[in-house]
Amino acid sequence: MKGILAGVRAPSAHNRQPWKFKILSASEKNSIADVLENKTRDIPGHTGPHTAGIIRNVPHLIMVFIDNEVVENRDMDIISIGACIENMILAYTDMGLGTIWIGNTNLVSNEIKEILDVPYETVSCVGVGLSDQFPKARPRKDIRDVMV
């Protein structure tokens, strides 16, 4: 819960706090992984099947939803949810845990609503557990390439 608490302390546009969370059970995780894998398996090069494997294997999965009932400015709400997720990841990392930010779940948002019996749209999810990998940092663009 400490990571989610850090998330809800994130800044949000107009202090709207448009996020909702659900920590999934193993069976819920597996059902979502199955749906994602089935939907993306025949799309050449799609990362969905790989993501489904991650969802099955991660010890804890936190779904992050947007509260569609109160959307005034969707773009700002999505940006706010991004800040929330980053706060969560930083908090879990500070606690010595590994995290993974998973975006492919938004491809099966309608199915997730049914599986979890929630009225909210899936934005993303965060996997949390003990790190079993320590990859090198991915390359980043040079500052000259992002300044205008």
Image: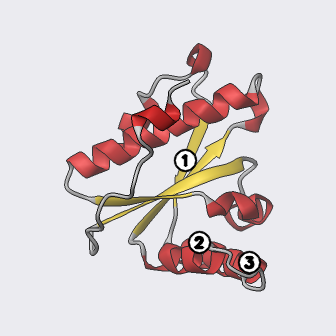
Residue at 54% from the left image edge and 23% from the top image edge: 12
| Residue 1 appears anywhere in the view | no
Q: Is residue 51 above or below residue 14?
A: below
The answer to which image quadrant residue 60 occupies is: bottom left
* Mark toward the start of the polypeptide (3 vs 1): 1
Q: Report the amino acid beneath label 3.
A: Thr
- Which class describes the residues within 10 Å of circle 1: few (<14), some (14-19), or many (20+)? some
Q: Nearer the viewer, mark 3 or mark 2?
A: 3
Residue nearest the observer in this picture, 76 or 25 = 76
Is the C-beta separation of discs 1 and 2 under 8 Å? Answer: no
Calculate the distance from the C-alpha at mark 3 to the C-alpha at mark 1. 25 Å
Q: Position of residue 33 (x, y in %)?
A: 61, 76
Q: Is residue 105 above or below residue 118?
A: below
Q: Is residue 109 above or below residue 28?
A: above
Residue at 43% from the left image edge and 41% from the top image edge: 86
Please tell me the numbered disc located at residue 21: 1
Please tell me the numbered disc located at residue 40: 3
| Residue 47 appears anywhere in the view | yes
Please tell me the numbered disc located at residue 139: none
* Mark toward the start of the polypeptide (1 vs 2): 1
